[in-house]
Amino acid sequence: MSSKPAALVFDLGGVLADWNGIDPLIRLSGGKLDREAAREFWIHSPWVARLDQGECEPLAFAAAMSDALQLDIPAEAMRDQLENWLAGAYPGAPELLAALKGRFRLAALSNNNALHWGKIEREFDLLQRFDALFASHLLRLRKPDAAIYRHVEQALNLPGNQIAFFDDNIECVDAARERGWQAFHTIGFEQLQATLRRQGWL
């Protein structure tokens, strides 16, 4: 069991919200991409980095994505699919944050974009439950680059060991650990809940 942190910092997609860009991408590729290759596309693609950092519009990204992966899908249709892959908050996620609020400072740290962020604001009942929001496309910084973790530390005015972080991508977890954060690799809402309970924080 880790020491109790001052702040809990959550990724959104794959942790508190139902985002699956892996299985649909495998299907659209006709099997050319396996699960790990599809996952790594979202971490390592230069076009994803540009989208995450607010350097290109979702429609331009959709066109580039379709071209790069040889998906043969018009840009508008690809953009619509991308929006639909973000399905909603996991059942119980708003209630979880409500249960934690007051005992911890709560923050979201998400690689995100204008398309998905707008949908989360309108439909998910999550963002207003945080004390601080760190979205890559607004900060022009993205995980797993060290600069975004430094930014969070400075904004929260906390050392890394006072921050607990939950993310579904191991690269982002490893980068947080390098900063001294208490970082946990959790995939899906059930793993998140189990980890919080195991630490005695829920």
Image: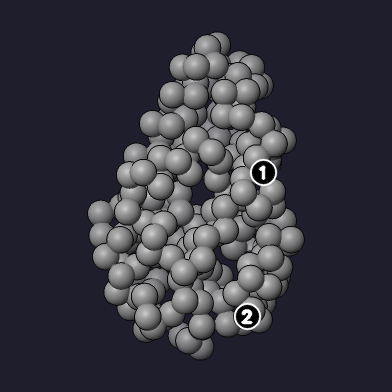
Marking on residue 158: 2
- Which residue type does callout 2 highlight? Leu
Relative height, residue 137 to residue 130 (above, below): above
Which mark sits nearer the N-terminus, 2 or 1? Answer: 1
Question: Residue 64: image x %, image y %?
Answer: 65, 22
Question: Residue 99: image x %, image y %?
Answer: 29, 74
What residue is shown with label 1?
Answer: 53
Task: Name the residue at 62% across, 80% down.
Answer: 158
Task: Name the residue at 38% across, 31% down.
Answer: 84
Q: Nearer the viewer, residue 117 or 87?
A: 117
Task: Name the residue at 49% across, 24% down.
Answer: 79
Relative height, residue 176 to residue 78 (above, below): below
- Distance from the alpha carbon under mark 2 to that under mark 1: 24 Å
Q: Quadrant of residue 114 in the image? A: top right
Q: Let me know if residue 190 appears in the view.
A: yes
Q: Quadrant of residue 128 in the image? A: bottom left
Q: Let me know if residue 169 appears in the view.
A: no
Q: Nearer the viewer, residue 197 or 134?
A: 134
